[in-house]
Structures are given as structure tokens and as C-alpha cells.
Image (cartoon, rainbow, N blue to C red):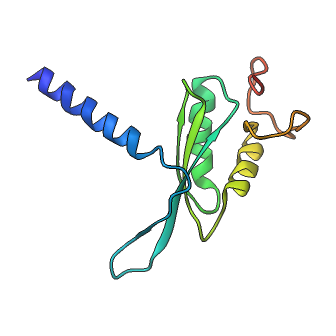
Amino acid sequence: MKHIFKISVLAFFILFTFGAKAQDTTAPTGAGTQQTDVAVYNVKVMFHCANGKALLESELPKKRGVVSAVAHLDTKIVDVTYDTKLTKPETINEYIHQIGYLVESDPADTKLNNKACSHGEGHQE
């Protein structure tokens, strides 16, 4: 019975992981209700520890237009689900800067006013 449960959990995780990898896909939601255009923005963020992961996942959804954020420590990819009517990927990059992290597409001379990491560099690779 334990094996069946583990296999079920693994199958769900795999399906969820592959389903969350779409980049900037727009999907209308709600039948007969107010429609919202939701997309997923996958961005590489220069965080390096579990605290950074937790910070990104807790702070990004507080920003205007961001529905949720899932950070992957092993790849440094953050899957940001957002409302396309309220925000855009460039603004999400600014939100990440406000939290204290750089994104992969930032120029090398980009400076942060607030660095999230309190131990080591962790902001550049």
C-alpha cells in the first residue's frame, strides 16, 4: 500500500512539474464569471539557499498581479503565475529586484538597493 501511495505522489509531482513549465502562456479562466488572463513566467533568479527560495515564494505573491511563485533551488528557476492584465514579465523582474535578487537577464553592472542574502554573496554566479 505504501508503494502505491508513493507512486501516486510521484506521478502527481511529475504531472504538476511538466504542467508548470510553460512560459508566458495565456489561459482564460472561469466559465460565466469574470475572466482573468493568467500566464506563467519562468525566470532564472540568482538565489542560492532555502531561505531565498522561501523569501521569493512568500514575497512575490504579495506583489500586484502575481498569483503565485514556485522557486526551484536546484535550477534557480522561479515559476511565477501572474495576471497578464495587471503585470508583465519586466515588472516581475523589478519585483524580484525589490526583494533583493538579480535575474539572469540583468546586465553585469546591475546594482541592488536591497540585497536579500545575509550570508555570502549569493547574488551572482
Residue drawn at the location 44% of the way across and 80% of the way down: 34
> 86 or 27, which lies in front?
27
- The residue sitting at the bottom extreme is 32
Q: Horizontal placement of 123 versus 30: left or right? A: right
In the depicted structure, whether residue 44 falls above or below residue 125: below
Left or right relative to 48: residue 23: left
Please report the residue visible at 87 percent of the width from the left and 33 percent of the height from the top: 108
**With respect to residue 13, does 42 lie above or below?**
below
In x, y percent, where is residue 39? 52, 59
Q: Quadrant of the C terminus?
A: top right
The image shows residue 28, relative to residue 99, as above or below, that is below
Q: Could you say which quadrant of the image residue 84 lies in?
A: bottom right
Quadrant in the picture for residue 74? top right
* Residue 101, x across and y down, in percent: 74, 36
Q: Residue at x 89, y 37 (%)?
A: 111
Q: Is residue 18 left or right of residue 40?
A: left
Instruction: Say which residue appears at 32% left-offset and 40% top-offset.
Output: 15
Q: Quadrant of residue 76?
A: top right
Percent x, y of residue 68:
51, 51
Task: State the count of labels.
Answer: 0
Of 60 and 106, the residue lying toward us: 106
Position above or below: 30 against 110: below
Q: Quadrant of the N terminus?
A: top left
Q: Residue furthest top?
A: 120
Image location of residue 104, percent across then percent down: 73, 36
Q: Horizontal placement of 104 versus 82: left or right? A: right
Viewer-nearest residue: 117 or 124: 124
Of all residues shown, which one is farthest toward the right?
109
